[in-house]
Image: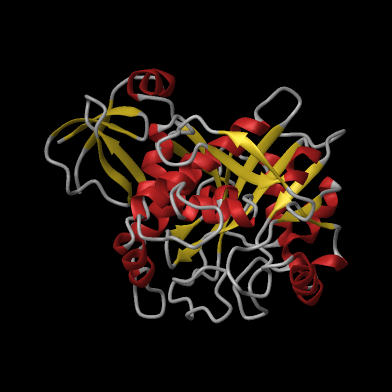
Amino acid sequence: MKKLHLLTLACMMAIQSFGQSSVVYFTKDITPESLVSIYEALGVKAEGKRVAVKISTGESSRSNHLRPEFIKNLVQKLGANIVECNTAYGGSRSTTAAHRRAIAERGFNDIATVDIMDEEGEINLPVTDTKHIKYDIVGSHLQNYDLMVNLAHFKGHAMGGFGGVLKNQSIGVASSSGKLYIHSAGRSTTRWMSDDLDGFLESMAAAAQAVHNYFKQEGRNIVYINVMNNMSVDCDCDGSPATPQLKDIGILASLDPVALDKASLDLVFNHQSVAGDDASPLIKRIENLHGTHTVEYAEKLGLGSQQYTLVNLGEQTDIEGVASEYSHLYNVYSLDGKKLLTNVSSLDSLEKGTYIVNGEKTIVE
């Protein structure tokens, strides 16, 4: 075991020296009650606001989408509408009529009003990055809301490698033609084109930033939650997904979508796989499709930071002083700010020297 000596250096100084570190909250408990608790930890009030909870309603009853009974407490506490947009492929949700039947079959109408945001048309949001898309085409009903809870099911994806809050905010909020526009990297709003992988991933990042910026206007707000359960290599847009090989991990939430997806990815990539709890199929799917590029590009655009502090809520609502297995993971930077290790349980691989470990200057002997 390496001997560690902590030097006196405030965490805020480390943040100032090595970039902004965003807070990501974590709980291993995947229950309706913990979903409410982790939302409350973000400190964003919904009173007086028209609230949208953006989910995926799933391609079939066999999809791994978040179930109504799981999200009910949060949706009803916020007095929110569930919001969705129609899909761009010929499945069960490609038209408003078909989508409404699917929503009813899945039981979402039983807990809240479900708003298909592109039912009455679409609007264009400005994008900061015009490398591929010149605007973001979203459902027109987006403008009816003051607060959006981006409630994503974290899992794999057949084209993007993985789906978390960035995908839920880009593809998920886009209208049918907007989905085609992103998938084609800005080349078409009328036909499916998917031959430019990095262009697609970068277009998702640009579209996610457009929605974020829209809700960061005065009087509006947006928060982000990833639920890491039933993590198949396939998306909830797949009506017959592969059986998940990785056990459930927990729920994460943040005000920073880049930090949130990055933290979720780190928990997968640093998972200690054993028989019956194997992260390797999902990791392979992400790596084969260059999925982490979406997060990297979103950070480059200024949407958020890949540097984060993981705060564990444990089984309590008080976020201070709670110890858990994830509280003992280490993030290590060199003194010049280069990230060396992410969410590792041991520092034994480090050579003797001085590092920034979890925001503190540390000597390893």
Q: Is residue 83 above or below residue 273?
A: above
On the rendered structure, is 143 left or right of 293? right
Q: Is residue 239 above or below residue 286?
A: below
Residue 140 point in image, percent of width and height: 74, 44
Tell me if 82 is positioned left or right of 359 in this view. Answer: right
Compare residues 265 and 13 and report the one nearer the observer. Answer: 265
Specify the quadrant that holds the C terminus.
top left
Could you tell me which residue is drawn at 35 percent across and 80 percent down?
A: 275
Above or below residue 363? Residue 153 is below
Tell me, yes or no, if residue 256 can be seen here. Answer: no
Q: Quadrant of residue 110?
A: bottom right
Compared across the picture, whether 34 is left or right of 277 comes to: right
Q: How is the image coloured?
A: secondary structure
Query: Percent from the top left, x then y, of residue 70?
Result: 72, 64
Toward the left, the furthest residue is 352
- Res. 273 image quadrant: bottom left
> Is 260 displayed left or right of 338 in the figure?
right
Q: Residue at x 86, y 57 (%)?
A: 113
Work out whether residue 17 or residue 315 is closer to the camera in this orientation and state it.
17
Expressed as whole percent of the image width and height from the top left, the position of residue 20 reads 43, 26
| Residue 13 visible in this rendered orientation of the protein | yes
Q: How many marks?
A: 0
Residue sitting at x 52%, y 51% = 181
Q: Residue at x 50, y 45 (%)?
A: 260
